Image: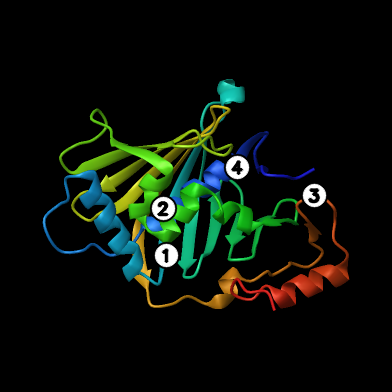
Amino acid sequence: MVKNTYRIAVGKTFLRISFSTVLAAILVVCAAGPAPAGAPARSIGEILSKTAANYRAIHAFTAVFSQKTVSAAATTLGAQKAGGMLYYAKPRQMRWVYETPEKQVFVANNKFAWLYTSEENRITLFDSQKLFASPLASTFFDGALRLRNNFNVSLDPVLSTPDMAVLQLLPLKKDPSIKSAYLWIDLRTHLISRVETRDLLGNTNTITISSFTPRPSLDPGLFQLQVPAMAKVFDASGRMLPPARVEQLQSTITSGSRH
């Protein structure tokens, strides 16, 4: 049964895509943007303010991402690594194309989210509203300044440098999807270049963004459900959907809107 955790095949092991992984992805997406002019921010308030200004100024972008997942329950496997291309467009539309170690595509918009695994030719759907309802996601969509409404935000004195601020986020209320998070913010550009999250089980997910390129817009088709020939589609409960229901979904998922 598929619930809140998806497993992507990595050889004979598995790279876990959990809500904490996706939330880390959202955090990077929502905080990215062009660098404002002016001197580097030094206080946490200034850092969050300039990071929020970045997001307000961006409409779409592409970037290269790398991901590292460490499972607390499988420490003998070591860190699992993956990477590929990221596409993002407002409002709340993102497409993660995994090029390594296996071909995978993860897409989320306002109403739906799904994962396609090419090796299995399978699509798994789940409710993206649950994903975006998380305090970690919603505070960044509402603005980085509101992080303090849901998190205790502090500057890590050990990891931080004169050019890089590393913020530690601790939920003010118990969150089943995240125990803590760290944000690496470049003080010269006020871009978040890395996010590390740890869930209650001790699993750690790190996402790093590079080659960030703002775009005026992106093809809406990137965020619509496209079902390859002979692919099987499963809902969040693990039930395979009949062809008629799949066809209906394809016609209703249009740029994150349900008609």
Q: Nearer the N terminus, badge 4 or badge 3?
A: 4
Please say if the residues under marks 3 and 1 sit with CB atoms less than 8 Å apart: no
How many marks the image carries: the answer is 4
The quarter of the image holding the C terminus is bottom right
Query: Which residue position is annotated with label 2?
Result: 28
| Number of other residues with Cα within 10 Å of mark 2, as a class: few under 14, some 14 to 19, many 20 or more | many
Secondary structure of the residue carrying numbered label 1: strand
Where residue 75 appears, x then y in whole percent? 56, 22
Going by the numbered disc 2, the residue's amino acid type is Val
Please say if the residues under marks 2 and 3 sit with CB atoms less than 8 Å apart: no
Foreground pick, 213 / 131: 131
Label drawn at residue 62: 1
The quarter of the image holding the N terminus is top right
Query: Which residue position is annotated with label 3?
Result: 237
Secondary structure of the residue carrying numbered label 4: loop
Label drawn at residue 220: none
Label drawn at residue 18: 4
Going by the numbered disc 4, the residue's amino acid type is Ser
Going by the numbered disc 3, the residue's amino acid type is Ser
Where residue 151 appears, x then y in whole percent? 40, 41
**Which image quadrant is residue 20 in?**
top right
Left or right: 45 in relation to 29: left
Q: Nearer the viewer, mark 1 or mark 2?
A: 2
Q: Nearer the N terminus, badge 2 or badge 3?
A: 2
